[in-house]
Image: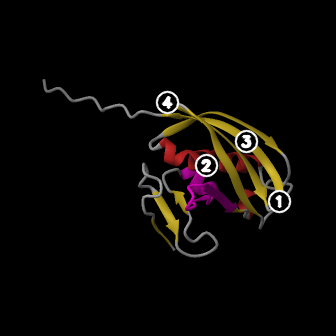
């Protein structure tokens, strides 16, 4: 069962927390239908502030060779960018750059975890890098940049 999460990520009310299973206590965003359909992807903020991200490989994540599809790695890594930056971001953002290297294959049943960090935090840009692993095996390295998006005020309707 999933329930609404406490304010783990301050800017989003569209998060749910798993209450049972392998990822009990972990959260995911429900606002992104692409990620929801391709996940579930999970993140957790540790007591020291470190953000952990993970998912368990299912049949739907595989390509024709029965390895995790490269697009799945990329989608999860993009999810990780936002989870890793979430406390600093504190609002909406967009990915403005993304680079990656495919290092090894993962298979159905593997758990994929992300280790990552923010490398620079600017006024409007946040630079990050990370690596996806299954156990000790490095699978995929990535870097990306998120741009903070300022919400534009809605225009006031003028009565005629």
- x and y percent of residue 11 in the render? 42, 48
The answer to the question of whether label 3 and label 1 lie on touching residues, with beta carbons closer than 8 A, is no
The answer to the question of whether label 3 and label 4 lie on touching residues, with beta carbons closer than 8 A, is no
> Image point 84% across, 59% down: which residue?
66
Q: Is residue 31 left or right of residue 96?
A: left
- x and y percent of residue 25 in the render? 54, 69
Q: Which residues are magenta?
A: 33-55
Residue 40 in the magenta stretch? The answer is: yes
- x and y percent of residue 64 in the render? 83, 54
The mark found on residue 123 in the picture is 4
Which SS class for mark 4? loop
Q: Earlier in the sequence, mark 1 or mark 2?
A: 2
Disc 3 or disc 2, which is closer to the eye?
3
Specify the farthest residue to the top.
160
Circle 4 Cα neighbour tier, 10 Å, few/some/many (<14 / 14–19 / ≥20): few
How many numbered badges does the structure rendering display? 4
Disc 3 or disc 1, which is closer to the eye?
1
Q: Which residue is mark 3?
A: 142
Q: Earlier in the sequence, mark 3 or mark 2?
A: 2
Q: Which residue is mark 2?
A: 79
Which SS class for mark 3? strand
């Amino acid at each position: 069962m999933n329930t609404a999460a406490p304010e783990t990520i301050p800017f989003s009310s569209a998060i749910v927390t798993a209450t049972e299973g392998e990822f009990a206590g972990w959260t995911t965003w429900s606002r992104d239908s692409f990620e929801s359909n391709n996940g579930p992807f999970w993140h957790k903020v540790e007591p020291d502030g470190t953000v952990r991200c993970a998912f368990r490989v299912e049949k739907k994540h595989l390509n024709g060779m029965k390895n995790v599809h490269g697009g799945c790695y990329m989608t999860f890594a993009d999810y990780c960018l936002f989870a890793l930056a979430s406390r600093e971001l504190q609002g909406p953002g967009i990915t403005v750059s993304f680079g990656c290297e495919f290092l090894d294959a993962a298979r159905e049943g593997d758990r994929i975890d992300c280790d990552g960090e923010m490398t620079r935090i600017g006024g409007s840009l946040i630079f990050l890098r990370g690596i996806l692993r299954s156990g000790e095996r490095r699978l995929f390295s990535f870097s990306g940049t998120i741009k903070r998006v300022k919400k534009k005020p809605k225009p006031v309707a003028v009565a005629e």
